[in-house]
Image (cartoon, rainbow, N blue to C red):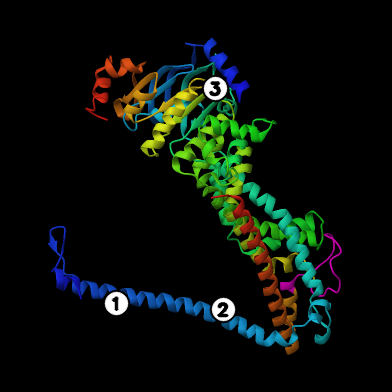
Amino acid sequence: MSAVLEERAAVSSANAGNLIVKVRDMNVFYGAFHAVGDVAFDVPKNQITALIGPSGCGKSTVLRCINRMNDLVPTARVEGTIDYHGIDINGPGVDPVEVRRRIGMVFQKPNPFPKSIAENIIWGAKINGFKGNTDELVERCLRQAALWDEVNDKLHESGLALSGGQQQRLCIARTLAINPDVILMDEPCSALDPISTLRIEDLMRELQRHYTIVIVTHNMQQAARVSDQTVFFSLGENRMGILVEAAPTKQLFTNPNDQRTEDYITGRFG
Amino acid sequence: MSLRTALGPSSIGLARVDEPSNLAARNTKGSIVRTILFLATAFAILALGALIWDTASSGARWLSLDLLTNTASRKPELAGLRPALFGTLWVIGLTAVFAFPVGVGAAVYLEEYAPNNRWTRLLKTNIANLAGVPSVVYGLLGLGVFVSIMSMGRTVVSGALTMSLLILPVIIIASQEAIRAVPSSLRDAAFALGGTRWQVARDHILPAAMPGILTGIILSISRAIGETAPLLVVGAAAYVTFNPSGITSKYTVLPVQIYEWARRPQQDFQDLAAAAIIVLLVLLLLLNATAIYFRQRFSKQVKW
């Protein structure tokens, strides 16, 4: 456990303040429908960036573009550049499989594989060429996801036999197994009870020391509790999602620049 | 005690609803429909039962080990099914080897790889149509292509290839349905970990779809065992005294043997045909049971 984490910690402190992902001029179309228009924001390394906004304003769409998951939707078309370590990962010639190896994702409804807990964690590592000790990998990832103590005696039972909060932590452990740079989380707590939610928020703050996290949430209090930077989306003309404001969390919640942001966070709409 | 009497009439929306007369009529209608559905089921079971009873009573006295070990003969007492049984096993075995990989592979391609455009939709529609083509047409196709043009002759391999074409559409459609039924959350999770299309299909989609795929295979094999017309056309022989020696030998199969015996005027051969039908049914049951056993084992590997 120590070697990998030491290396990441060293990298984190060396890169403090770096921007790891830069989105520019992003427009997303589903067929003829212009779903997201002219989005641009930065994701700082080793910080938690929250994307907030009312339902249907394109937050999840934007998130899914960052790891090329929208490639799986036949009618989706993504324009613009997504700069990751100097390479435009939305450009031609970039293999989405390689992108997803470095930018992982946790989904809204926990979706562990219908296999054992250990196999859930091992599969991602194996297909990406891992040849080391799988027992050690499983223990390390479950410890990082704060799940080891609860499941270490039933690693060969089905992942689906766990509770909702445990399943979500298993999905996080599974993502950690491939050692990504960035972890995208699409409303990871919206299907969970409040106690599990707080546990996962604690986990996020733990993980941010070694990974960069981008989280979509419709829960403003969660964004305020957990994130370092917040990006506020809203609905423009013709139900197109637009980016209204991006700022450090404290500033956005106490002193927003845009009136629409103020209206949303004070609950006047949304 | 009727609720209406105890509690008074109720209303829906703003109108008083007159429950009692309405309720009695609805119940009666329900009873009538239930009786009709029961009679339909009973009729189907009785018809099947009558068929089996008729066959069994004619053929029962001919059931013996000799029936299974003798070869064809002009004398009913000496006639047997051995060449036909072996022929069926050879042909069905070879059919399975050709049809399963091609059928399941085509389904995986159509569902996981093919782009969602007009050509793919055309392809899928055509496959659905092929499932409805009469089986004798496949026999004619096999005769023209495998027996003549490719000069494979009237051999086991020609018969097996013809039967493969026959059951391919059913396998493809059943496999497609099974693959489509796998929840997209499973695909999302696997792709998000950096899996390629094949890795996701091999390790997650196919195992989850396996019970459905195996059901399609069971159904199509059951159909293939009983098909007579295409094999008659493509050259299953009528009077065969030997077991098939390989995939390039001449052969006969059970349904064809039944047909040949049933054509003969002697009553004894008619009863022999009935006995052979019983053997065919038992073979069908055994193969289905084996396939269902494998389907159960596959279901257990996926820990829903």
Look at the image and tell me whether residue B143 can be seen. no
Q: Is mark 3 on a helix, strand or loop?
A: loop
- State which region is magenta: B238-256
Q: Is mark 1 on a helix, strand or loop?
A: helix
Q: Residue sitting at 65 percent across and 47 percent down?
A: B105
- In the drawing, does residue B229 fall left or right of residue A228? right
Q: What residue type is labelled 2?
A: Leu
Could you say which disc has been placed on residue B28 in the image? 1
Q: Please determine whether, in this image, residue A88 is positioned above or below residue A95.
A: above
Residue B302 image offset from top left, x and y in percent: 59, 50
Q: How far is the residue under mark 2 from the one under mark 1?
A: 31 Å
Could you say which disc has been placed on residue B48 in the image? 2
Residue A70 image offset from top left, x and y in percent: 48, 31
Q: Residue sitting at 62 percent across and 64 percent down?
A: B134
| Residue nearer the viewer, B194 or A178 | A178
Q: Earlier in the sequence, mark 2 or mark 1?
A: 1
Report the residue marked by disc 3.
A181
Residue B249 image offset from top left, x and y in percent: 85, 63
Quadrant of res A29: top left
Please say if the residues under marks 3 and 1 sit with CB atoms less than 8 Å apart. Answer: no
Q: Which amino acid does label 1 sit on?
A: Thr
